[in-house]
Amino acid sequence: MKATGFISLWTLVSLPCGQLANPAEHEDVVKHAIKLHRGKGAVITQRKQWVLESCRKLSGLLRQKNVVLNKLKNAIRAVEKDAGLSDEEKLFQVHTFEIFQKELNESENSVFQAIHGLQRALQGDYKDVVNMKESSRQRLEALREAAIKEEMEYVELLAAEKHQVEALKNMQHQNKSLSMLDEILEDVRKAADRLEEEIEEHAFDDNKSVRGVNFEAVLRVEEDEANSKRNASKREVEDDLGLSMLIDSQNNQYILTKPRDSTIPRADHHFIKDIVTIGMLSLPCGWLCTTIGLPTMFGYIICGVLLGPSGLNSIKSIVQVETLGEFGVFFTLFLVGLEFSPERLRKVWKISLQGPCYMTVLMIAFGLLWGHLLQIRPTQSVFISTCLSLSSTPLVSRFLAGSVRGDKEGDIDYSSVLLGMLVMQDVQLGLFIAVMPTLIQAGVSTYSSIFKEILRILILIGQILFSLAAVFLVCLVIKTYLIGPYYRKLHAESKGTKEILILGITAFIFLMLTITELLDVSMELGCFLAGALISSQGHMVTDEIMSCIEPIRDFLAIIFFASIGLHVFPTFVIYELTVLLFLTLSVVIMKFVLAVLVLSLILPKTSQYIKWIVSAGLAQVSEFSFVLGSRARRAGIISREVYLLILSVTTLSLLLAPALWRAAIMKCVPRPERRSST
């Protein structure tokens, strides 16, 4: 191998004097390379002398490396035969020699890889971009592998250094008598070393060979501080705590999720600052919206806009803020379920099941029609139509919060119908997320496999229906046998303190959330069903739990609506305001008309008057279109432009929703029932 590498080197460095002198392009490249090494005025004899000297030096280094390798082998044999060393000390010394051997071999390989890379570049066509891209990719892969090997070697050297220091300490301890305190500390040190070895997860070594794992170059960025001295000292601390940020070549930013040393507590100070900033700015924004007659949720969205990428760009932990905001959705739907008793659910279950299904089918039909006229792909049309057919459950829940809603002479309450339809749309959301992989494949499938795709969709629908049946069976068992004794036990244990009650209710919410997630149904449905099950215990139970959970819901809802504002881009809306207003009004009017049409067919004649209120509550686009749009964009179902249009139309429809809701309430609801509906 070494001889072959040396011949390759000699061949390459001799090319300027022989083989590469014929092609004009190669000759120019060689001349330029020699000028870089020897200067612009180098003569031919000096060039030849430089080639000979370089080859002579490299040959001498290779011979010296072989001599050192032989000495290392002899040293390893001598250590293995030394009877005065313990087995542990032998392993350590042999391992140290092997590290040095590996470093010598890797250094040699790096030299010849660089030479082969230069030879490949000289033989390639510099006008061929594809060839240059492939060469760059190969060099990048080689650098990544070299970086991984060097990182492993560095870690091994650190371990060897640590072992050397410990061996020196042991020798010092043997030469002097230890006090009782020193002996105790030595025992603690050994126990701490064993603890670190036991809890340490070799995630890097375990995952680097897993299929689908790629090596990438990242930047490690420390936090900027005005005071450079403070920054220097803080950097040393953060290096130890691992609190810096990593940025990859695609500009994705990462923070530490699990440290190597789990014995030291850590906190993500970026996330803490983000939550504190959102909490402080939400107050004036919400106050302003209350003053001008808008729901406070729009103040929280404005807060997210001001702090997000389109504003001050001060939010660093966007993913973490959005994750915490999801809990706002969970608790909001739980409180909706508390107000939505099983008796009311039984009264409107047919309407709640039929209405969203009919509306979704009609929206998809209109979407396919317009897509055919505008020459849009069917998969894209289906996705956009389904996205736009969903309505915002948290927004409507805030509209209905605390309103006076009573059934009159057996009529159906508009809030029951509206919440039932929204919950069914949440179920459809889970179904659509499950069908998205099929949409991705359908975008690249041929007509010969269209029947297979239809069969797959039917199978997925069957699985969802089976999961829904299993969920409601579980709910029936919990309502009949478990929820009553469970709440009575919580109530008995929580006398004098609400801690156990809050913890018990939260655990029950998360249990139902987990059950629906395991059954491939949306987690939001599990939160709603948790509230509906507890509401079956009576109004006193509902009022007590609501007084405990509402403050938690309110704070988490602030985070949720602020996270929506992080994805609102006012500059894009301003640039395309005319188009976006036309699209938004078209979507809102279409959803309102379709909802009125569907409800006219399925509502009883005595309850036809509520169709206007329910339609007004459904005539906006759900904030979950942000989630679906981001997934579809990553999967290639929709383009960047369509994604931004969906975000903007969703935002504008949410802004129009309060005005439409207020108009419907003023028209259809008697004055005593308007107290809190707006």
Image (cartoon, helix red, strand yellow):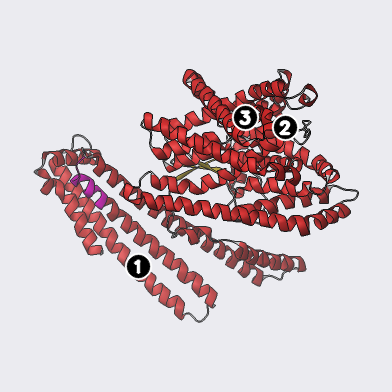
State the CA–CA distance, disc 3 to disc 2.
14 Å
Query: For the residues carrying marks 3 and 1, which lies nearer the camera in this image?
Result: 3
Q: Quadrant of residue 313?
A: top right
State the CA–CA distance, disc 1 to disc 2.
80 Å
Q: Tell me which residue sits at (55%, 30%) in the image.
A: 594
Q: Name the residue beneath numbered marker 3.
A: 615
**Residue 137: image location, x then y, percent:** 32, 47
Q: Tell me which residue sits at (72%, 36%) in the image.
A: 412
**Residue 148: image location, x then y, percent:** 43, 55
Q: Quadrant of residue 463?
A: bottom right
Specify the amino acid type for callout 2. Answer: Leu
**Front in this rendered view, residue 146 or 394:** 394
The magenta span reads 116-126
Specify the amino acid type for callout 3. Answer: Ser
Specify the amino acid type for callout 1. Answer: Leu
State the CA–CA distance, disc 3 to disc 1.
82 Å
Q: Are marks 3 and 2 in contact (CB under 8 Å)?
A: no
